[in-house]
């Protein structure tokens, strides 16, 4: 007859544990339950969403650094979430940022967030402003509370090409790219045109990995190019980390992309085409604090720019960059800012020998033809198909 | 208490114990990362099940997992470990778009187009996994490896199709197929933002359970899964069973792809490859390949996924935290599989002794 007694004690113990647990929960509930929604007064809450990790040495890190630059600003609170896939998960994240964090501005930084996710949420929350990175906004087609921003980063790739041409002794450059889409082809071509503006004998070998993040194929491509005698590597993938590290290990030069990767290649890092989102985000927040919105027309729906508008920067020059290379790079940058230098100025042939841009024709950064680029410039080894 | 009850208790207590153990380990991890474990538990609860709005998030995350889990769970009853869910899902989605665009082009009414999309997705997904089954049965190719490798082929095929033959020329920087017209899209359940994929998932799980547990076909499949030789001696058509059950599993994953296309994306592109396939493998294993349990486990995992955001935003934990949590849960449940029949408390014993209450077993790790 000892069994029942024992059970009662155990039951009591269980009850006691449950009660303690429940008490703990209620205490927690009252302590932090209200915390996330505390967005009173004039505080502006902005939500930032990234498709990958914040420390990827690449696309997402560039955006996260831009977000971090808002930390010191008065009257601004930010909320961020990384590794949000381009599925309805991003809609749920946006909804939660609006409902729980009180966000009134959403910065959706991945290209694939726009259609259908941002567009759908913009209709559900007409009072919230949505800013999408990618330049996809079309007047009259998309909702009023949606805006889009993007940079002409091929300007920075052009300058990186100038530096690469100076550093290369084999005159063979390598470009590891994700997909043969217009945006990527434009970077490959601008990098090559920049290099060939210094030495017309320079060629760029391009390899498409087929994926935005495929470290194994990126490393394979980098190694095989190093084997072939390529001595400067650059890339357009989400995270350049593997490419830059492989280049350093193989003792060749590397030129960065998206963010600063200098610490991954202290010897061989030349420079890099970087986004300067901190400037862009500060501008947006300032405009919003002045009471401007997308809906009242105070904030333009489409914001794009290059060096001149502060969308881009170059990584500080590495030890492998000669004084003459720096001089040429700074000159090219200055000319791009002043508008004297137009990258896509005819006559430019593609690598099949056909004329891609007719002689005397100048395509400025806003030209529609550049948005639809489907060719590789003369001097690029590789094919789009 | 009878042995039947004891075995049922064992089936409930061991997985629950494994989850509790996983929570404890995850709590230690959070404490190491500088977050209050109890605050984290509470946040997970609040973000996953705390309100109708957040529960909808869980349901949204769970619905593709239910269908995709069946792609592993069904063949598992026949003794096959198949992890080709991702491949069947993306190809199912691709086929659904092709079907939807064709049928829509013929001017079929919406129900016809949607049915056509579902059938196309199921057919292609089913054939994809049936190939794995055929390789297994006729050529003795390891089905786990072949289905894994076929995922890569399927994803490459998706990329090829959306970059080439099926590309909408206006999709410049994100190559995609032409979109399904808005009117042919799957809508949401009334009064919610959860799409009809949830209903399809629940129905599929129910049907799969009935098929496996309550029909001759299911009995035959389970027999073959228990002992192929015995099944052959008994005259069961093992080859046909293998192909059929692989086809059904693949069809479920293909349907998941169709739902993603028809309810979420509206077109096929690389976003379709969002790891729902691998999530489904996890669900199937935790559910011990029981289709009904899979629907519950999908809810649980959906809840975990839904809480990923709040862990980052309220607790400053890294974005990989939710994956760590998932990994801990998976390992803990897999480990607990080895405890069946080992814990003395669940062993059959003389009827005089009263069995202990379930609480005492919550410490398998």
Image: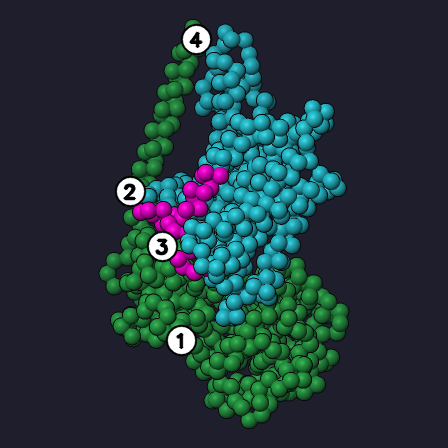
x, y percentage for residue A161? 61, 80
x, y percentage for residue B251? 56, 44
Q: Are callouts 2 and 4 both on one chain?
A: yes
Q: In the rendering, what colour is chain B?
A: cyan
Q: Are callouts 3 and 4 both on one chain?
A: yes
State left or right for residue A304 relative to residue A236.
left
Q: In the rendering, what colour is chain A?
A: green
Q: Residue A214, located in which quarter of the rendered image?
A: bottom right
Sequence order check: which comes first, mark 2 or mark 4? 4
Residue assigned mark 4: A2
The boundaries of the magenta stretch are B180-204
**Element type at mark 2:** helix
Q: Are callouts 1 and 3 both on one chain?
A: yes
Q: Does the magenta stretch include residue A374?
A: no
Q: Which residue is drawn at 34% across and 36% down?
A: A24
Q: Which residue is drawn at 60% across and 78% down?
A: A375
Residue assigned mark 2: A30
């Amino acid at each position: 007859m000892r069994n029942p007694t024992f059970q009662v004690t155990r039951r009591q113990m269980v009850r006691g544990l449950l009660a303690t647990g429940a008490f703990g929960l209620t205490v927690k509930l009252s302590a932090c339950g209200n915390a996330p929604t505390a967005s009173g007064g004039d505080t502006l809450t902005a939500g930032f969403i990234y498709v990958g990790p914040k420390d990827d040495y690449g696309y997402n890190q560039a955006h996260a650094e831009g977000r971090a630059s808002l930390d010191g600003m008065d009257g601004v609170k930010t909320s961020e979430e990384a590794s949000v896939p381009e599925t309805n998960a991003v809609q749920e994240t946006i909804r939660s940022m609006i409902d729980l964090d009180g966000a009134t501005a959403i910065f959706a930084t991945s290209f694939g967030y726009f259609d259908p996710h941002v567009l759908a949420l913009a209709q559900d929350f007409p009072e919230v402003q949505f800013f999408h990175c990618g330049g996809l906004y079309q007047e009259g087609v998309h909702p009023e509370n949606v805006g889009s921003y993007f940079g002409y980063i091929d300007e920075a790739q052009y300058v990186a090409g100038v530096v690469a041409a100076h550093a290369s002794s084999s005159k063979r450059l390598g470009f590891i790219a994700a997909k043969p889409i217009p945006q990527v082809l434009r970077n490959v071509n601008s990098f090559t045109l920049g290099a060939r503006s210094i030495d017309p004998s320079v060629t760029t070998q391009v390899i498409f990995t087929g994926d935005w993040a495929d470290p194994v194929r990126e490393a394979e491509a980098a190694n095989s190019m190093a084997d072939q005698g390529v001595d400067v590597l650059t890339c357009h993938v989400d995270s350049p980390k593997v490419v830059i590290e492989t280049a350093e290990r193989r003792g060749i030069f590397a030129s960065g992309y998206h963010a600063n990767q200098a610490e991954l290649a202290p010897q061989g890092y030349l420079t890099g085409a970087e986004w300067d989102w901190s400037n862009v985000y500060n501008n947006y927040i300032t405009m919003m604090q002045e009471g401007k919105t997308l809906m009242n027309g105070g904030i333009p729906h489409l914001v794009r720019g290059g060096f001149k508008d502060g969308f881009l920067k170059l990584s500080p020059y590495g030890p492998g960059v000669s004084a003459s290379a720096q001089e040429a790079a700074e000159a090219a940058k200055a000319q791009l800012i002043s508008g004297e230098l137009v990258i896509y100025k005819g006559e430019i042939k593609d690598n099949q020998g056909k004329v891609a841009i007719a002689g005397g024709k100048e395509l400025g950064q806003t030209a529609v033809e550049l948005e639809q680029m489907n060719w590789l410039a003369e001097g690029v080894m590789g094919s789009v198909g | 208490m009878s042995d039947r009850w004891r075995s049922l208790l064992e089936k409930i207590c061991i997985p629950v114990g494994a989850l509790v153990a996983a929570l404890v380990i995850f709590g230690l991890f959070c404490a190491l990362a500088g977050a209050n474990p109890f605050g984290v538990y509470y946040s997970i609860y609040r973000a996953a099940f705390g309100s109708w709005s957040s529960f909808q998030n869980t349901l949204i995350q769970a619905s593709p997992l239910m269908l995709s889990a069946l792609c592993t769970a069904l063949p598992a009853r026949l003794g096959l470990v198949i992890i080709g869910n991702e491949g069947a899902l993306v190809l199912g989605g691709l086929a659904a778009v092709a079907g939807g665009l064709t049928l829509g082009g013929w001017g079929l009414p919406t129900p016809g187009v949607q049915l056509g999309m579902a059938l196309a997705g199921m057919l292609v997904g089913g054939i994809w996994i049936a190939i794995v089954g055929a390789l297994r049965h006729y050529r003795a190719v390891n089905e786990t490896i072949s289905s894994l490798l076929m995922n890569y082929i399927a994803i490459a095929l998706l990329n090829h199709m959306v970059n080439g033959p099926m590309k909408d020329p206006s999709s410049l920087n994100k190559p995609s197929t032409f979109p399904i017209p808005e009117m042919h899209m799957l809508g949401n359940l009334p009064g919610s933002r959860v799409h009809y994929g949830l209903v399809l998932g629940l129905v599929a799980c129910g049907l799969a359970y009935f098929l496996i547990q309550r029909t001759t076909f299911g009995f035959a499949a389970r027999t073959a899964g228990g002992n192929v030789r015995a099944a052959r001696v008994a005259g069961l058509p093992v080859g046909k069973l293998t192909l059929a059950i692989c086809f059904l599993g693949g069809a479920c994953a293909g349907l998941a792809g169709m739902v993603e296309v028809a309810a979420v994306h509206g077109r096929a592109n690389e976003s379709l490859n969002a790891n729902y396939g691998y999530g489904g493998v996890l669900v199937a294993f935790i559910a011990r390949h029981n289709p009904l349990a899979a629907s519950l486990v999908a809810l649980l995992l959906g809840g975990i996924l839904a809480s990923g955001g709040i862990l980052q935003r309220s607790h400053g934990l890294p974005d990989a935290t939710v994956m760590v949590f998932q990994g801990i849960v998976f390992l803990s449940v897999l480990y607990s599989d080895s405890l069946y029949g080992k814990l003395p408390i669940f062993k059959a014993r003389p009827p005089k002794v009263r069995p202990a209450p379930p609480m005492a077993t919550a410490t398998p790790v």
